[in-house]
Amino acid sequence: MDDPVASRQQATGLTAVEAVRTPEERFADLPAFGFAPRYTEWQGLRIAYVDEGEGRPLLMLHGEPTWSFLFRRVIPRVREAGYRCVAVDYPGFGRSDKPTDLDWYSYDHHTAACRHVMELLDLRDVVLVGHDWGGPIGLRLGTEVAWRFSAFVLIDTPFFTGRQTMPPVWWQAHDYMKETPDISIGDLVRAGCAAAPAPDVLAAYEAPFPDAASKAGVRAFPLRVIPRSADLPAARACWRTMKAMRKDQRPTLILWGESDILFPLELGRWVAGALRREAPVVVPGAGHFLPEDRGEEVARLVIEWLES
């Protein structure tokens, strides 16, 4: 296996920022995730994505601290139903390069990276499927390049306007990440699931992160990216997105795990009200990582909704 330090030096030679490029060997034998990776360059960083199937495109955007592996049980069923599945790994996640500076990460950067992939593939008539942070990122794209989107699926996704109140479990995770540079990704995923994933699944969530430096993006989301004040640029951008979506008439499906301890169902109902959308469809036996707990059910609900 490649030395992560060597990979870091290689990536640094390609970019203006120091970044980790995860050795490909770490992605060998991923359970139920045999999709071929595709790559593009954005601001000197290599961005990875999956592009499977043909037909109307579904843009699948993961949250924190996962990557496109989260959608491994959703993609095959949606693809078989006649849709195209494009799942992006943000910078700092999955097979994408991972800047090591926490201050590099921002709502702007992640939105711009996803927009680059959309424009590269010239995606149109897009259905967003956004989990967690994938909701604010995808909905922002849905307002900035509105003509590319026709519908939205939001999965356990909040809005961070600087006015939000985070539950105690979120603050526990925040303090853990602040004090522990070499965090356990598997522990974070396990804590957010209704049922503990199998060891090989947890190992797959750990696979993109060969060392502590590669986990800067995971730590940056709670420590840097989520705005704590309504005056911060990220908060204003999120607020603009939410206000724009309140006036938007495009179809929106909201799915929520019944046992989400990170963003409880009450928040899901608030999101639906804030966007003037129908109440969330509650999925039993699922926690925050709904596509992990009930991936086949997510696929079924999305397909039935699109075809209705």
Image: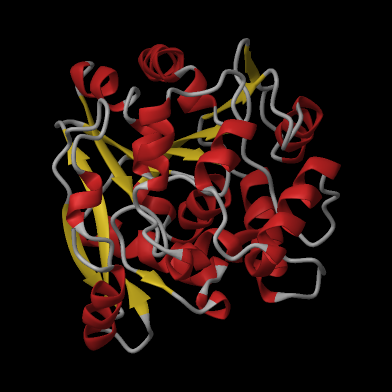
The quarter of the picture where the N terminus appears is: bottom left
| Left or right of residue 258: residue 297 | left
Residue 119 at what x, y percent from top left?
Answer: 26, 61
Q: Residue at x 57, y 79 (%)?
A: 103
> Left or right of 131: which side holds 262?
right
Q: Is residue 235 visible?
A: yes
Question: Along the line of sight, which residue is nearer the eye, 57 or 262?
Answer: 262
The residue that appears at 25% across and 25% down in the rendered structure is: 32
Q: Quadrant of residue 241?
A: bottom right
Up-down: is 278 above or below 184? Answer: above
Q: Is residue 141 above or below residue 10?
A: above
Q: Quadrant of residue 150?
A: top left
Q: How many marks?
A: 0
Residue 287 sits in which quadrant? top right
Asked whether, in this view, residue 266 is left or right of residue 134, the answer is: right
Q: Picture coordinates of residue 143 (x, y %)?
A: 51, 56
Colouring used for the render: secondary structure
Locate residue 147 relative to residue 105 in the image: left or right.
Answer: left
Quarter of the picture containing the C terminus is top left
Q: Residue at x 14, y 32 (%)?
A: 54
Residue 133 appears at what percent x and percent y? 56, 49
- Image x and y of residue 47, in percent: 27, 63
Q: Measuring 37% from the left and 83% from the top, which residue is drawn there?
A: 18
In the foreground, 253 or 33: 33
Above/below status of 209 relative to 284: below
Depth order, front residue of 1/256? 1
Observer able to see residue 127: no
